[in-house]
Amino acid sequence: MKRRALTIQYGGLALAALALAWLAWKFPILQWIASAQRWVQSLGAASVLVYPLLYALCNVLLLPAGVLVVGAGFFFGLWAGFLLVLIGNVLGAAIAFAVARTVARKWVERKMLSSPRWQAMDEVIGEKGGRIVFLSQLHPLFPTSLLNYFYGITRLPFWSCLGWIALGQMPGAFFYVYLGTVGQYGVQLIHEKSRFQLSESGLWIAGLIAALGVTITLAKMSANLLKEIDERASALRVL
C-alpha cells in the first residue's frame, strides 16, 4: 500500500510533466501561461483575496485544486504562494467542518459512518486524537477535502482540528508551490527575462529535490495509518 501510494502520486507527476511537454509542443502553452500571469498580476491586491477563496471553494465542493497549488507558486512566488494556498486550504476546511458539525451533521453521519473504512477512521481518531488528522493530511491517497467534512462529526475541537490540518498540509503544499516557482523560473529563462546561472539553477533544483525528499518521507510515515485503518475496516466487514 505504501509503495502504491507513492507510485500513484509521483507517477502522476511524471505523467503530468509529459502531458505538459506534449501540449507545449503542439500549442503555444508558454504564451498562454505568460498571458495568464499578466492577467493575475493586473488584478493587483484583488488577486491575493480571490486566489485563496477560489482554492477554498474547490475544497468545499470536493473539486481537484492541484493546478491552483502549482499556479500559486507560478503567479505569486514561493512564500506568498505557499501562504495563500495554506490560507485557502484552512478556510475551506473550516467551512466543511462547520457545515458537517451543524446543518448537515445527520446527513454526513449517515453517509460516512455506513462505510467500514470511515468507521475505522472514526475509531482511530477517537483513540489518538488530532495527531491522526496530521498524518491523514500527509498521505497522497487520503481524500483530504472529504476528510474535512468527516472531522466535523467527530469530537475533535474546531480550532485544534484546523491547526492539525494546517500542519499536515504544509509539506505537500510547499512542494507543489515550489514546483510552480521552478516552472516560473524556467519560463523566464525561455523568454530571456532571466539569465541562466548555474549556481542559481542548481539551488532551485537542489531545493526541489529536498522538498520532494521530505514529502516522500512524511508520506511513508502516514502509510502506517492507512494500513491500520484498512485492517480495522476489514475486521468490521467480517462482523
Image (tube, rainbow, N blue to C red):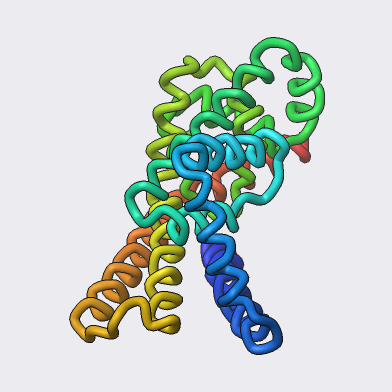
Left or right, 72 with reference to 99? left
Nearest the camera: 166 or 58? Answer: 58
Above-or-below relation of 101 to 193: above
Nearest the camera: 29 or 113? Answer: 29
Task: Give the residue at the far left of this rendering.
Answer: 199
Nearest the camera: 208 or 215? Answer: 208
Tell me residue 129's x, y (percent).
45, 25
State the image quarter where residue 110 is shown. top right
| Residue positioned 50% across, 18% down in the render | 156
| Residue positioned 44% across, 51% down in the render | 173
Task: Give the residue at the far top of this rendering.
Answer: 102
Above-or-below relation of 15 to 179: below
Q: How many marks?
A: 0
Left or right, 145 with reference to 80? right
Question: Do we see residue 11 in this rendering?
Answer: yes
Above-or-below relation of 199 to 37: below
Tell me residue 10's x, y (percent).
53, 70
Question: Do we see residue 132 in this rendering?
Answer: no
| Residue positioned 52% across, 45% down in the render | 43
> Which quadrant would the C terminus be assigned to in this image?
top right
Above-or-below relation of 57 to 21: above
| Residue positioned 58% across, 41% down in the render | 55
> Which quadrant would the N terminus be assigned to in this image?
bottom right
Tell me residue 49's x, y (percent).
50, 35
Task: Give the residue at the far front of this rendering.
Answer: 42
Left or right, 213 with reference to 148? left
